[in-house]
Image (cartoon, helix red, strand yellow):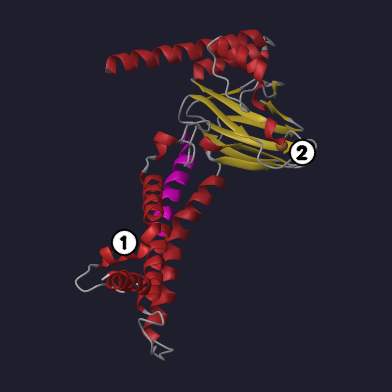
Amino acid sequence: MARAGVGRVKAVRDQAMRGTRAPGEGAIAAAWRVLGKWRALALLATVAVAAGWLAPGAALAGTGQPSPWQINFQGAASPIAENMLSFHNFVLVISTAIMLFVLVLMAIVILRYNERANPTPSKTTHNTALEITWTVIPIIILVVIAVPSFKLLYDQYSFPKPDLTIKAIGHQWYWTHEYPDYGDISIDSVMLDDEERAELIKQGIDAPRMLAVDNEIVVPVNKVVHVLVTADDVIHAWTIPSFGSKVDAVPGRITSTWFKATKKGIFYGQCSELCGRDHARMPIAIRVVDQDVFDRWIAAMKADDEDKAKEIIRAAIEREKKTRRLAEAQQS
Ligand SMILES: [Cu+2]
């Protein structure tokens, strides 16, 4: 009797190894059985992929700076960044569909046309209709991707008329920003160390690690800003992810990018070209404020009154916080 039991177990195992269906067994049930001890892993992978794909990007990604466990882009705060996000999502859908299609084809080939299931394979080598199809469909897919891609590229390089021009100069290892429209205003931004940050945080001022700087630059909201970028030693790169702006800073040359910040607040970026020892410690911090706050800040900077300029920005942040709290209170 015991021997018969062993035989039955062996038969079931052989069946599983062959990957063929038992009589009356559905395809999903068969796949489940074949997976065996990998079931948990397969389930986990499926859930992880689904969660990553379905999770709303905005909820996970900070705007203006990275957030813990972020898996998507930083939130968009300019028309170009918004286009980049939607183009990325569009291509993600297409590439996911292609990946799933190829996966299904592979599964069919592996399960149905393996040596055991299909001992005498077909000798067919050509199928004109099929060959035309698998050439033409990818071409159509590429054209569908290329059209919005070129449009986005074109938008990035067609600079609207500027309301403000800033010159950014990369140094080993900090950034200088000048405001050529307003005389000789020049701002050096050096990253804050942990002690300096702790001091600010104690005063209730946000100062994220590796991003907060001693002197932020300020721009008005909803205005076109051109950024002329250069460097005085080695190649750096100027970028603010939430604005969708990134360009190399090359010594002896002026490169340029532009943005139109559509949200107020603080937006950080980091040097994006390996430039030496402290490459990771030269962040860019842009404070986006209302036009009237910007005008007052510029006036204070022109008068060489940096303390007053900082006070103007700090007061604006406080006002902003208060308005937000009031709006939240009214909503709840
Ligand atoms: Cu650099």
Local packing at callout 1 (Cα closer than 10 Å; few below 14, some 14-19, many 20+) is some
Cβ of mark 2 under 8 Å from ligand 1: the answer is yes
Amino acid marked by disc 1: Trp
Judge by depth and name the residue closer to the eye, 35 or 222. Answer: 35
Please identify the quarter of the rendering in which residue 246 is found: top right
Q: Can see residue 101?
A: yes
Magenta region: 76-94
Residue underneath mark 1: 32
Q: Is residue 173 left or right of residue 270?
A: right
Q: Residue at x 51, y 29 (%)?
A: 223
Residue underneath mark 2: 276
Q: Quadrant of ligand 1?
A: top right
Q: Residue at x 62, y 31 (%)?
A: 165
Q: CA distance from mark 2 to mark 1?
A: 53 Å
Q: Residue at x 65, y 25 (%)?
A: 181
- Residue 96 percent across, percent down from the top left: 40, 57
Q: Quick one: quadrant of the C terminus?
A: top left
